[in-house]
Image (spheres, grey):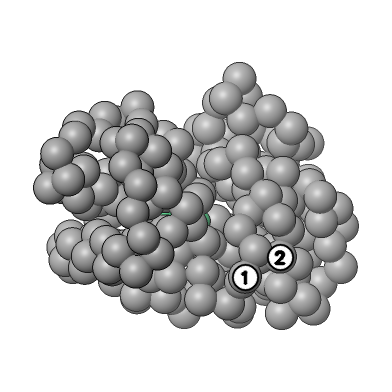
């Protein structure tokens, strides 16, 4: 039972994009601008392929869509350019951009003295948490700057659980991507998928957003 989660679990690990905030549309705008500059279109459907994926891997997928081959130096340059545009867009976000239930659930966990961590692929995670005014809720923040292996490798969640000093089987991960669900399960953790069962097989529980978990 989803309700029992709070009694049984000790560590609560959150993915960022798609779970706490919808930054996917800003990633989309920035990638679309880059694609346009290179002379091809990038659809919202294509953007689904980039969710939960690292920045460099996202660029490689974009280049595959545009059927372009470029050098590693050019890749680094383009990834930085996209990030510059993305960060410009992030400047407009504030607490009103939190997904439903996020603030209430984090508050509830803090009141219950539960341990809370972030496990995100984003190198901008700390900046985003500060903009959203929820940085202080996190005991541990593991982001794209601290991991070398992308989801579905469990590294990001293992580091988060170790940082919280909670056994993996007492951790629950909240994820909106298939790679993230696989990463958490392979670490022996419990998973709440944020999204549809059909699109995200393999999780232990399903919610549309965090407002469905609040007791
Ligand atoms: P950055 P998450 C992921 O965040 C996004 O879903 C993914 O689209 C993005 O490419 C990745 O972060 C890297 O982000 O360019 O800011 O380092 O879902 O793992 O919280
Ligand atoms: Mg995500």
Residue drawn at 42 percent across, 42 percent down: 61
CB atoms of marks 1 and 2 within 8 Å: yes
Using the image as rendered, state which of residue 46 and residue 154 is in the foreground.
Answer: 46
Q: Which mark is residue 51?
A: none
Q: Circle 2 sits in a helix, a strand or a loop, which is it? A: helix
Which residue is drawn at the image coordinates 59% and 47% (left, top)? Answer: 175
Pointer 2: what residue?
A: 155
Residue 32 seen in render? yes
Where is mark 1, residue-wise? 148
Residue at 33 percent across and 54 percent down: it is 70
Q: Is residue 95 left or right of residue 13?
A: left
Residue at horizontal 71 percent and vertical 65 percent from the top: 155
Question: Residue 180 location, x and y as percent?
Answer: 63, 48
State whether residue 130 is above or below residue 215: below
Q: Characterize the local packing of mark 2: few (<14), some (14-19) or many (20 or more) Cα atoms within 10 angstroms.
A: many
Image spot of residue 77 (x, y percent): 27, 68
Q: Secondary structure at mark 1?
A: loop
């Amino acid at each position: 039972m989803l309700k029992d989660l709070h009694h049984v679990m000790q560590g609560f690990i959150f993915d960022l994009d798609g779970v706490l905030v919808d930054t996917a549309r800003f990633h989309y705008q920035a990638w679309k601008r880059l694609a346009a500059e290179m002379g091809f279109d990038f659809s919202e459907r294509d953007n689904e392929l980039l969710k939960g994926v690292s920045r460099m891997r996202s660029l490689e997928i974009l280049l595959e869509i545009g059927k372009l081959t470029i050098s590693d130096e050019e890749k680094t340059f383009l990834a930085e350019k996209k990030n510059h545009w993305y960060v410009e867009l992030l400047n407009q976000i504030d607490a009103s951009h939190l997904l439903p239930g996020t603030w209430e659930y984090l508050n509830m966990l803090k009141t219950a003295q539960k341990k809370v961590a972030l496990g995100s692929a984003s190198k901008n995670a700390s900046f985003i948490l500060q903009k959203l005014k929820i940085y202080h809720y996190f005991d541990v923040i593991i982001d794209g700057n601290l991991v070398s292996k992308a989801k579905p490798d469990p590294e990001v969640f293992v580091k988060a659980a170790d940082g919280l000093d909670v056994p993996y089987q007492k951790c629950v991960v909240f994820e909106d991507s298939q790679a993230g669900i696989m990463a958490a399960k392979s670490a022996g953790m419990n998973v709440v998928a944020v999204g549809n069962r059909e699109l995200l097989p393999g999780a232990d529980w399903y919610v549309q957003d965090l407002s469905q978990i609040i007791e």
